[in-house]
């Protein structure tokens, strides 16, 4: 998490992420989470996906990030945006949401931190709330300049989420190379 506390790393991330968005994931989310539902994006980064979510869910979207740099930059261009500073592990908020969304954010958590986050996600979701998260596909962990990248298999994610969620689907997709990524859509049980 300390990686995103340095403005130079924020600039590097924004440059690296140019040209990528979660349009494909959001298209899937929309199939399960109706308009006018409240949605929290966990780890909004520069806000590319947050803007896409707002196109469908309008004023019911809340963006969050651990880095105040990301929050401040987005707020400068979108002063009316609903934004909060949140840690993806603890998700300390009293608010409840119909849906939770993240695009390659939970990959920066250790396996134990991800377990904690999943439990907390269930706490802040309304009954039968929907989650949509994407991950790198595989079975390894990497560290680039202090930033953790965890890779997951569909089977592992199924086991992680099934205690708190009814998994609707886990599917592979391509972000950079064929089947390099996967997403999960699940309903709070």
Image (tube, grey):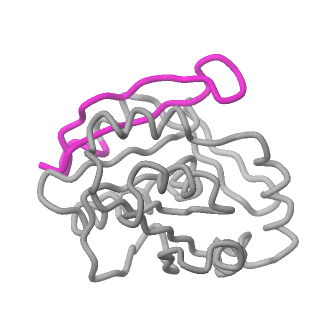
x, y (%) of residue 138? 56, 30
The quadrant in which the N terminus is found is bottom right
Q: Is residue 11 above or below residue 151?
A: below
Assess whether residue 86 is covered by the magenta stretch: no
Q: Residue at image x 48%, y 52%?
A: 53
Please give left or right for residue 153 compared with residue 139 in the image: left
Q: Is residue 80 left or right of residue 76?
A: left
The x, y position of residue 6, in whole percent, is 80, 77
Residue at (58% x, 36% y) in the render:
136
Q: Quadrant of residue 5?
A: bottom right
Please give the name of the residue rendered at 24% of the width and 35% of the height, measured from the top-left corner: 167
User: In front: 37, or 114?
Assistant: 37
- In the displayed structure, 173 sits above or below 66; it is above
Residue in the foreground of this view, choosing between 143 and 135: 135
The stretch in magenta equals: 160-189
Which residue ends up furthest to the top in the rendered image?
178
Lateral position of residue 128 relative to residue 144, left or right: left
Q: How many marks?
A: 0
Asked if the magenta segment contains residue 185, the reply would be yes
Q: Residue at x 47, y 62 (%)?
A: 42
**Residue 150 image offset from top left, x and y in percent:** 58, 46
Tell which of 134 and 96 is nearer to you. Answer: 96
Q: Is residue 79 above or below residue 137?
A: below
Q: Nearer the viewer, residue 75 or 80?
A: 80
């Amino acid at each position: 998490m300390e990686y995103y506390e340095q403005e130079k790393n924020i600039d590097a991330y924004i440059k690296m992420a140019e040209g990528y968005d979660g349009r494909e994931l959001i298209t899937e989310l929309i199939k399960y989470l109706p308009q006018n539902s409240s949605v929290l994006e966990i780890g909004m980064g520069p806000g590319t996906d947050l803007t896409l979510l707002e196109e469908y869910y309008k004023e019911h979207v809340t963006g969050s990030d651990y880095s105040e740099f990301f929050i401040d930059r987005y707020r400068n261009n979108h002063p009316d945006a609903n934004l909060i500073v949140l840690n993806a592990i603890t998700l300390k908020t009293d608010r409840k949401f119909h849906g939770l969304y993240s695009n390659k954010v939970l990959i920066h958590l250790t396996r134990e931190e991800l377990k904690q986050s999943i439990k907390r996600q269930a706490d802040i979701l309304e009954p039968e709330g929907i989650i949509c998260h994407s991950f790198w596909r595989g079975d390894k962990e990497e560290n680039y300049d202090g930033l953790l990248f965890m890779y997951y298999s569909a089977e592992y994610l199924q086991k992680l989420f099934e205690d708190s969620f009814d998994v609707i689907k886990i599917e592979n997709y391509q972000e950079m190379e064929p089947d390099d990524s996967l997403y999960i859509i699940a309903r709070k049980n």
